[in-house]
Image (tube, grey):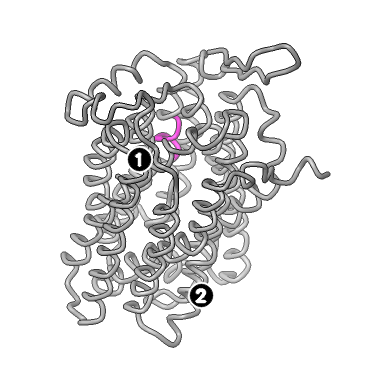
Amino acid sequence: MAGLFADTTPLRTRDFRRLWLAGIPTVIGANLTIFAVPVQLYALTQNSAYVGLSGIFALVPLVVFGLWGGALADHMDRRVLLIIASCGLAVASVLLWVQAALALNNVWVVLCLLSVQQAFFAINQPTRSAAIPRILPSDQLPAANSLNMTVMQFGAIVGPLLAGIMLRWVDLSTLYLIDAITCVAPILATVRLAPIPPSNGEVGSSGWGFGAVLDGFRYLAGNTVVLMSFVVDLIAMILGMPRALFPQMAHESFGGPVEGGTTMALLASAIAVGAVAGGVFSGWLPRVQRQGLAVVAAILVWGVAMIGFGVASGLAGGAAGLMLWIALVFLAVGGAADMVSSAFRNTILQQAASDDVRGRLQGVFTVVVAGGPRLADAVHGAAAAAVGTTIAAAGGGGLVVVGVMVAAVLAPAFVRYRVNRPGPGRPDDDEV
């Protein structure tokens, strides 16, 4: 039974432990903002299309600054870049608080500030991920990625639930303010890290412009396994992430108030509940060698779970209370599957890429992981306006199942990808 629980060996390394502990309050604060933005947009417009539009306003800076931030992470000291990005996130959160506190009630101000925040996030995330393999040995990366995912999803549980409870006594501006305050933690933790210069010791040798970004894509195009890890995640997220529908579903399907409240909080946190459960019982992950097959299986489970979620919301009717809990179970199952998929995909990337291009590939990873759901917001928002939330959610899950099966057939090398664990007298080698 002990082997089922999360492997905490990476926490013995001081720098990783500092980043991990600082992430606990940070992800809670960030999820207060993630909760507040769609709730504010829906309260101002009562239209899911505007909630979906936030996906476009977040996606553009995620793509541009995610790719450029990855190039910067290969070009300069990653510790310095983390400090800059963390400070930028803090400023963006302060500005979101100001607009809410002044009751500007302007949809476009909210959307533009969201874009600024996502730009700094897009620089921070690939830099942080690219730094982890410099802090830990390769055999600890699956456990480290699982621990990081568990913290992120823990914040995705506590943040929305805390927001739903707090909104009974405070307004949305307080949620933004708390997020700004929690941004101090990663700044302090990053300042105490050891320097993480480029691996060859020459700052600036790898370049940081458009050419460097293209070099990263050329490297990616030549590695089928890493490339397919991005493709299958895009299939799962763009077609199967229904979060833009949560405000409308909470109100229309399950009888919650239009301004959010407990029902919205439960929907927003359910995927994270499953992911945390998956992280707590992730002790088996480091023993899996067929990592590509594990990713495909996890995404299939995700797609089936989203079908169940959509159907449950459509059957709510007079049994809204019961169907809400059934819908939450499906979301939780999907969250556990997504945690497994993400941990393996990140491990594949960190182990397969050399350090001099790792930042750029992590930039692509950030664009895919964070940008996919943002694009899904726009797709699902438009689909809900056209065919309703039930068909948008359940149909998206069905497309995920079909899409990932087609991808597995077209790229068998990804399904066959195997990591050979080191044994006595045997080097640590990967087979692609």
Q: Position of residue 139 (x, y in %)?
A: 62, 29
* Residue at which label 1 appears: 78
In the image as oriented, which residue stretches furthest toward the right?
1
Q: Residue at x 45, y 56 (%)?
A: 189
Mark 1–mark 2 Cα distance, whole angstroms, equals 40 Å
Task: Give neighbour class at mark 1: few <14, some 14-19, many 20+ (Cα, 10 Å).
Answer: many
In the image, is residue 268 above or below residue 207? Answer: below
Q: Position of residue 252 (x, y in %)?
A: 42, 69
| Residue extent of the magenta highlight | 232-236
Q: Is residue 59 left or right of residue 162?
A: left
Q: Is residue 81 left or right of residue 320?
A: left
* Residue at which label 2 appears: 262
Any mark on residue 218, and which? none
Inspect this view and state whether residue 314 appears.
Answer: no
Q: Residue at x 76, y 16 (%)?
A: 424
Element under disc 1: helix
Name the kind of residue labelled 1 in the image. Answer: Arg
Front residue of 270 and 9: 9
The tag earlier along the polypeptide, 1 or 2, is: 1
Image quadrant where residue 302 sits: top right
Give the total number of marks visible in the rendering: 2
